[in-house]
Image: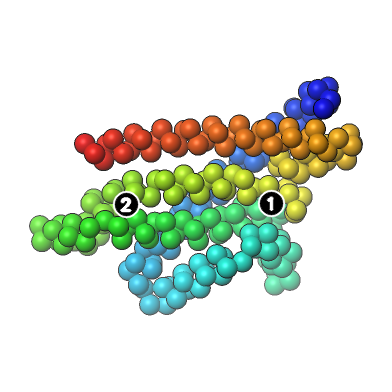
Amino acid sequence: MDITIIIDSLPSLLKATIMTLFLSCISVIIALVIGFSTALIRILKFKVLYEVASIYISVIRGTPLLVQIFVIYYGLPQIGISLDPISSGIMALSLNAGAYLSESFRASILAVDKGQMEAAISMGMTYAQAMRRIILPQSLRIAIPTLSNSFIVLVKDTSLVSVITVTELLQMSSLIIAKTFEPLTIYLTAAAIYWILITFFTTLLDNFEKRSSKHLVR
């Protein structure tokens, strides 16, 4: 392993890491909105929206993310919708993560004792007030472990958008390899950067989960 190549490549790899973080953060924010909205639609069972949400979750969970990326980037232009690589990548990652987060949110909301909703309504609260003040705060704490895991998976999944030329960490690694002809060195360096990122976020999210659990116990 040539240390000189690593040192020379590091600035470009770190710059591409910023793109990886950008894709991850933007996608997870959009995915949270999609997942939470879809979960509520399925729980409240709005007629048409319930069917649309169910089909969306079934299709996304039943097809590979890579295929979804190809469909959005290469397929949508055939019906007049053209997106640049970054927008396509964010859309694919958000829709994919949103489907899984939806199930996490739905399970966590249903995990809260139904008696609490009944008690809140008997005290004069509306259904919406009870959801906002009592059910949702508890369900969000319950969902934290799965939400954290989904974010970690999303960070790693950003590597797939390299297939549509988004210059994130994996794509930059491939470009550097084309110049240096050192695949083992560059890929191991990229793997180390991914590992550092995942370790950092895992530690951060674990600490957040522990603090939330202490608060819940109190």
* Residue 37 visible here: no
Residue carrying label 2? 139
Tell me where residue 74 appears, x and y as whole percent.
74, 64
Pointer 1: residues within 10 angstroms few (<14), some, or many (20+)? some
Q: Camera-side residue: 156 or 132?
A: 156
Residue carrying label 1? 160
Q: Considering the numbered disc 1 on the image, is that residue within a helix, a strand or a loop?
A: helix
Q: Quadrant of residue 92?
A: bottom right
Residue at (15% x, 57% y) in the render = 120
**Which quadrant of the figure contains the N terminus?**
top right
State the mark number for residue 23: none
Q: Which one is earlier in the sequence, the residue at label 2 or at label 1?
A: 2
Figure check: 173 above or below 60: above
Figure check: 28 above or below 91: above
* Residue 216 visible here: yes
Q: Camera-side residue: 141 or 77?
A: 141
Q: Amino acid at mark 1?
A: Leu
Q: Amino acid at mark 2?
A: Ser
Tell me where residue 25 appears, x and y as whole percent.
55, 43
Residue at (56% x, 65% y) in the render = 60
Name the colouring of the figure.
rainbow
Q: Camera-side residue: 176 or 128?
A: 176
State how far apart marks 2 and 1 are (Cα): 31 Å
Residue at (72% x, 68% y) in the render = 75
Figure check: 88 above or below 183: below
Which residue of the protein is positioned furthest toward the left in this rendering? 123
